[in-house]
Image (cartoon, rainbow, N blue to C red):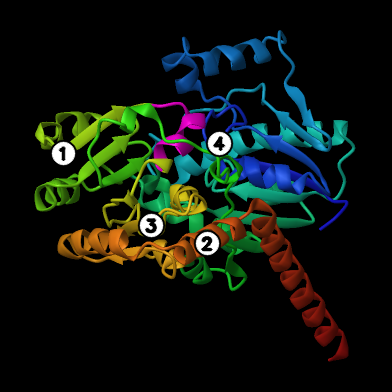
């Protein structure tokens, strides 16, 4: 796709501070198109509750006209911070009252988008909606894009916050979109129940920081006995299985289990802190992660298997593979995508066996194959797959139109 004007909306603001699929896709779009990345507007409750945070303070300065709302990020790419507040609607009962105020919010949001698109001279826009179920629900009707894409990268309807309204709304949003793209076969199967043009397009990952052969292991690992079985990332009890880690540390006392990342309260209170072969290294800067992974003998993704994780694409696995590391993970729908280059376990016992196998099987050939798979998961390939799906939908529409004319 070349020479188009694309409006991107979603749940993640440009200044989110962590990795964002939507931002990476927007950057890739902007190589050949003009892109307006619209940040989610500030809602009234957040404006009050989080008023002292840097995020809200910044948006208050923008609303007051003390900072620009429209910012040029790079050539062909702008990000916009909406000035108008929207109402906090999630607490409303599901049904007509919620729908009324959600439409009011969407109209405010759409009005600002239209104004910015006009200011930039956008015409016949393509709308890319990254999992924005509430504000995005009416945008096709209000913005009248030439083509609309809904992107599913998380099963929000399984999330407690979203369940109340999204279970009802998301199917309608899927139906109304011209195309639905996902980063999971599970999500694509779900969406296909409402829109036949629903496709899994894979996932991109910026692995440049993990591909340098000169990376040296950090000194923090020097005094930890090997083999080191490591994990990097936020230690969330909602997504990671503490019982699995307790089992592994007991079943493999000669192995060191190293966990790099901040912990939630459940992890902080867990019995893992009393295990002599479990090492919590805490939060580390993102640019240091490759040096930690370099020191792992095996990298793990000890996910729980539940509604939130089964289809969730684990970006960290691409990072592990980019460094040639053997990876052991739970067998989920999402991890099936990596089945040829990872060790997948369907039980605690199998997980322990897979770690042993990963340590024994490692070879230069396996390292090379892992790195090749990670390199194929680039953002360029990911967006090329999206373009291919757009062309497929447009071709189907042309064929249908020709068929109708010939009748």
Q: In front here: 5 or 236? A: 236
From the viewer's perspective, is 390 left or right of 184?
right
Q: Which residue is mark 1?
A: 277
Q: Which residue is mark 2?
A: 368
Q: Residue at x 81, y 87 (%)?
A: 403
From the viewer's perspective, is 211 left or right of 290?
right
Do the CB atoms of the residues marked 2 and 1 lie less than 8 Å apart? Answer: no
* Lower position in the chain sequence, tag 3 or tag 4: 4
Give the Cα distance between marks 2 and 3.
Answer: 11 Å
Q: Which residue is mark 3?
A: 326
Give the Cα distance between marks 4 and 1.
Answer: 37 Å
Q: Is residue 332 visible?
A: no
* Callout 3 secondary element: loop
* Lower position in the chain sequence, tag 2 or tag 3: 3
* Lower position in the chain sequence, tag 4 or tag 1: 4
The percent position of residue 390, horizontal first and vertical second, equals 73, 65
Which span is picked out in magenta? 284-293
* Lower position in the chain sequence, tag 4 or tag 2: 4
Classify mark 1: residues with Cα within 10 Å, few (<14), some (14-19) or many (20+). some
Q: In front here: 403 or 258? A: 258
The percent position of residue 158, horizontal first and vertical second, equals 36, 52
* Callout 4 secondary element: loop
Quadrant the C terminus occupies: bottom right
**What is the tally of numbered marks visible in this picture?**
4
* Callout 2 secondary element: helix
Classify mark 4: residues with Cα within 10 Å, few (<14), some (14-19) or many (20+). many
Give the Cα distance between marks 3 and 4.
Answer: 31 Å
Q: Which residue is mark 4?
A: 12
């Amino acid at each position: 796709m070349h020479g188009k004007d694309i409006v991107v909306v979603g749940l993640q603001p440009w200044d989110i501070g962590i990795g964002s699929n939507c931002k990476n896709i927007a950057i890739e779009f902007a190589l050949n198109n003009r892109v307006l990345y619209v940040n989610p507007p500030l809602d009234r409750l957040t404006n009050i509750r989080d008023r002292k945070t840097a995020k809200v303070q910044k948006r208050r300065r923008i609303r007051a006209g003390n900072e620009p709302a429209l910012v040029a990020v790079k050539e062909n790419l702008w990000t916009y911070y909406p000035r108008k507040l929207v109402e906090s609607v999630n607490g409303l009962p599901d049904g007509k009252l919620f729908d009324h105020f959600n439409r009011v919010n969407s109209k405010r949001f759409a009005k600002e988008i239209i104004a910015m698109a006009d200011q930039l001279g956008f015409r016949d826009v393509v709308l890319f909606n990254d999992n924005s179920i509430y504000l995005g629900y009416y945008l096709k009707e209000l913005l009248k894009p030439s083509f609309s894409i809904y992107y599913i990268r998380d099963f929000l309807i399984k999330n407690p916050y979203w369940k109340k309204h999204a279970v009802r709304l998301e199917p309608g949003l899927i139906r109304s979109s011209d195309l639905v793209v996902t980063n999971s076969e599970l999500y694509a199967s779900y969406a296909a129940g409402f829109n036949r043009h629903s496709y899994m397009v894979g996932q991109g990952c910026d692995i440049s920081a993990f591909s340098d052969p000169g990376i040296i292991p950090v000194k923090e690992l020097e005094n930890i006995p090997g083999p080191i079985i490591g994990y990097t990332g936020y230690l969330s009890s909602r997504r990671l299985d503490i019982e699995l880690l307790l089992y592994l540390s007991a079943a493999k006392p000669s192995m060191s289990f190293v966990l790099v990342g901040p912990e939630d309260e459940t992890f902080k209170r867990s019995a893992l802190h009393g295990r002599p072969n479990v090492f919590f290294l805490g939060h580390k800067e993102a640019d240091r992660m490759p040096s930690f992974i370099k020191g792992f003998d095996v990298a793990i993704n000890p996910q729980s298997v539940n509604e939130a994780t089964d289809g969730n694409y684990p970006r960290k696995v691409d990072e592990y593979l980019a460094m040639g590391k053997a990876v052991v993970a739970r067998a989920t729908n999402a991890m099936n995508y990596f089945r040829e280059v990872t060790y997948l376990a369907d039980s605690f016992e199998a997980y322990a066996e897979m770690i042993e196998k990963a340590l024994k099987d490692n070879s230069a050939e396996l390292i090379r194959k892992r790195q090749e798979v990670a390199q194929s998961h680039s953002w360029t390939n990911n967006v090329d797959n999206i373009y291919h799906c757009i062309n497929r939908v447009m071709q189907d529409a042309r064929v249908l139109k020709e068929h109708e004319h010939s009748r």
